[in-house]
Image (cartoon, grey):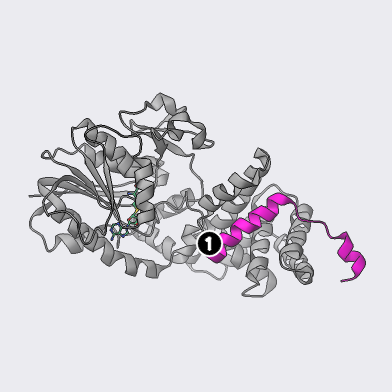
Amino acid sequence: MTGNRKLRRRRPDRPRLIAHRILGAVTQQDAYANLETARVLAEAGLEARDAGFVTELVSGTCRLLGTYDRILAAASGRDSFDPALADALRLGTHQLLSMRVGPHAAIATTVDLAAATVGEKVAGLTNAVLRKVAARDLEGWVEHLARAEDDLGRLALRTHHPRWIAQAYVDLLGDEAEEALAANNVPPVPTLVVRPGLASVDELEGEPTARSPFGARRAGNPADVPAVREGRAGVQDEGSQLAALALAETATPTGPWLDLCAGPGGKAALLAGLAIGQGSTLLASELQPHRAELVAQALRAYDGPHRPVTVAADGTRPAWPASTFAKVMADVPCTGLGALRRRPESRWRRQPQSLAGLVPLQRRLLVTALDSALPGGVVAYVTCSPHRDETEGVLDAVLAGRDDVTREATTQLWPHRDGTDAMFVALLRRS
Ligand SMILES: C[S@@+](CC[C@H](N)C(=O)[O-])C[C@H]1O[C@@H](n2cnc3c(N)ncnc32)[C@H](O)[C@@H]1O
C-alpha cells in the first residue's frame, strides 16, 4: 500500500464504528447484544436514524451470525479471521445480504472500517472476501451451502439456527418446526406491563395484549412512558405475564407467596401486586446479589403492609422452613431457547452441553419449590425454553419420587402460535 493510497482512505462513519464496538463486546466478551446496544447508544448521542441503523446492524448480524460465518468461510476459503476483522466482515455481510445498503457502499465502508480497526494490511482481503459474498443474495448462499446438507441441516440453514436447536424444535413440533424457527427471526414489539394496583393499562399508551389483562405492546423506548419511569409499570413479554397469572389465579390456601428465582424481577413485579390484591405478601428470592438488586428496583413502587420483600439466597438451600408458602414460582435458570426472538446472539452462544449443566440445578430447585409449598399449595414450574430435557424431563425425574404432588395443568406457549416467548408452565399441587 503506497503513501498516496493511505491518504485517500476515509475515516469509517460513526454508526458503523459503534456497531463494530458493540459486536466486539458480544462476540469477544459475551455481552448481551440488546443490553450492550442500549448502553452504548445511551452515551453516543446519535441521531434517531443513525441509532436505528446501529440497532438493526448489530441485532441482525447477531441473529444470523452462524449463517454469515459459514458464508464468509465459503467465500474466503478460511476457517477463521482476526476477531475484529471477523466482526467487520460479519457487519459487511449483513449490509450486503439483509439490508438496503448498496453493494458498493457496503463494501467500501467495511474496507474502511477494517482498515481503521484492524490495520491497513487487511483492506485488500476485506475487499476481496466481500466481493465474493456479494456475488450471491442470501437465498442463493443458503441454497449453495444447503447442497452439502441433510434435511435437518437444510432446515437449520434456512431458518438460521444451529443444528441442535433445529433438532429440538423438530422433536417437539414435527412439520410445524420450520414455522416456529422462522418466528424466532422476527423481533417482537416490546410488551409493557402494569404493576397491578399502581397503574392502568391505558397508561401504557400501547395496544392491549390479547390474553393478559395487564399488558400492552408499544414500539419505541419504554422509558418514554411515565408509569415505566416511575416504577409503576415495566417491560415483560406476554408469555411471562401469563405464567405469573396462571399461578396467581389458582385457588390455594391462604399464605405468603414465594418467587424462588426472581431476578431480574419481571414475574415478581406482577406477582407482588396480585398477592397484595389477595391480601398476601410476596417473598422474592434470587441467588445473585446484583440481580436481587434489580428485583428490588422492579418492586420499588409497592408500599403498605403487604409490600414485597426481596432477599439474595440460594434457592437450593432455603432460608425458610418447609411448607410455608401458598403459591411458589419456580422460574428456573434455563437455556432460554424460547426467548430467541428477543436475544439475537443467544442461539449461537448456547451449546447442547448447556443443558447438562442446567438440568440438575432445575431439578434441585423444583424439589425446593415443592418442599416450600403448604399442603394444598401450588408450585408453578416455569422455563423460557421449550426443550424437553428442561420441561417434561425435569418434571418426570422429580415427580417420579413424590406421591405428595399432583400435576394440574401444563401450558406450552409458542411465538408462531401465541405471539409470546415459548414459555413452559406446569402447575403442581402439593397434598
Ligand atoms: C429465568 S431467570 C428468572 C426470571 C425471573 N423470574 C423474571 O421473570 O424476571 C432465573 C434466575 O434464577 C437465578 N438462579 C440461578 N441459580 C439459582 C439458585 N440456586 N437459587 C436461586 N436463584 C437462582 C438466576 O440468577 C436467574 O436470575
The residue positioned 48% from the left and 33% from the top of the image is 218
In the displayed structure image, the side of residue 36 where residue 212 appears, left or right: left
Residue in view at x 68 percent, y 67 percent: 85
Residue 110, quarter of the rendered image: bottom right
Q: Quadrant of ligand 1?
A: bottom left
- In the picture shown, does residue 275 fall above or below 175? above
The answer to which quarter of the image holds residue 61 is: bottom right
Rendered location of residue 94, percent (x, y): 64, 55
Which amino acid type is shown beneath numbered disc 1?
Answer: Leu
Q: Residue at (48%, 42%) from the top-left corner?
A: 188
Disc 1 target residue: 157
Q: Position of residue 80 (x, y in %)?
A: 62, 74
- In the image, 48 versus 212, the foreground residue is 48
Q: Which residues are magenta?
A: 1-29
Q: Can residue 201 be seen at all in this image of the molecule?
A: yes
The stretch drawn in magenta includes residue 331: no
Q: Main secondary structure of the magenta part?
A: helix
> Quarter-wise, where is residue 255 in the image?
top left
Whether residue 152 appears in this view of the structure is: no
In this picture, residue 161 sits left or right of residue 298? right
Residue 118, how many percent across, how many down?
72, 67
**Residue 355 percent across, percent down from the top left:** 35, 66
Residue in the image at 39% along x and 34% along y:
233
